[in-house]
Amino acid sequence: MVQIGIIGGGPVGSIAGLALKNAGHTVRLFDPTTQKPQMSLALSETTLVLLESIGVHLTTGQDLVEILVTEKGLPGSMLLNAPECGHPRFGRAICSHDLDHTLTAQAAGMVEPSAVTQVRARTTTGNPRIELETGETLEPDLVILADGGRSGLSDDLGMGAQLRSFDRTALLGRVTVEKPVNGRAYERFIGTGPLALLPIDADMYGFVWSLAPPDADALKQSTSALLDALYLALPPELGGVELVCDVVKIPLVERWIDQPYRPGIVLLGNGAQTIHPVAGQGLNLALRGVSRLVDALATGDPDTAVRAAFTSWKPNRDLTRLASSSLEALFDRGLLSRKLLTSIGMALGDQSPWLKRKIGEAGMGIIS
């Protein structure tokens, strides 16, 4: 049994805490209440399996049964269908607040609303140390830092992140459509940037739209302009569109730490890596790391377990980073030759069950 202190009670910290507690470890989780924006999440099948294993049963959202990949104005498309790929679903789309509420109920009594003021790594003479604003000091066997990098604690530990701006801004929101297609998500590439659309209720979809910053600013300021732009950008089969919540604007910056651990300390979640959101893989990637850590702690001391977990997770981590950032780079090029190759590639890919299965499984985390 390992004594573990977790800093950060968002989805990654809460799920890590529940999974580690279920595995028999002693867990203390610290998280001052913070207001989080509403986002739409695409939870992969591996994430859903992890949630079920810790007693988290989702009752909201929609199963992702199909993913339609298209580029506006071009012939050719690729439709990924889960049953045709040998799976009942690729995952589940859900509003982030619904997931937060479910996790809060499951972790009731486990979260302590104390702020952490300092963290120190393990030394040759003692365990890692957590200092709270209350004056209490803890020396657990392992510290998990899952605060999204917002506190600066990772910088204090000498784990400065590499930051890379995509020179893009994401608009996040939810819409209702006139003619919803049950269980179908969309990956839509248009001249202004990639647009991901996730079905989260009967006729409601969450969207993430990557735009040039001036375009994002203009659309954020005018609801009518945004609705007109969305209507033109979305697949025609969905019909009319209406906004159902305030739109959130987020500058797209990749945050990356190559080796997100020190003696007695490991970073998980956005503090260790924040990747491009268009493929919806950030949370799924982090939770694959959580699963590997839980498994490794069953057979090794904390530092050995962290190194083993990271070594097994690193290839998937690097590949997910590359795939997520490449989508923006590839489809941001308006060259006619690129568009022609894309159209041909999607048309040919749509005829290959093997390729569609590999893309669907890799994208939704069924194979890690």
Image: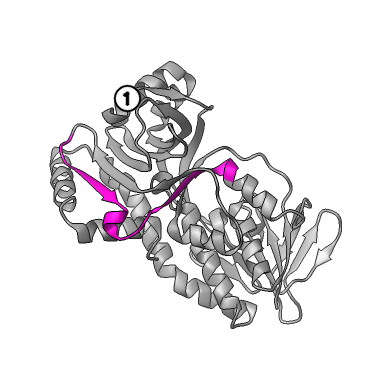
Quadrant hosting residue 242: top left
Residue drawn at x 42%, y 16% is 224
Q: Amino acid at mark 1?
A: Gly
**Magenta region:** 74-98
The verdict on residue 88 being magenta is yes
Residue 204, compared with residue 318, is above or below; it is above
- Residue 343: x and y, percent? 16, 43
Residue identifier under label 1: 239
- Residue 197: x and y, percent? 38, 38
Q: Nearer the viewer, residue 144 or 163?
A: 144
The verdict on residue 273 being magenta is no
- Residue 141: x and y, percent? 71, 74
Residue 131, compared with residue 235, is above or below; it is below
Q: Is residue 102 visible?
A: yes
Q: Nearer the viewer, residue 123 or 81?
A: 81
Quadrant housing the N terminus? bottom right
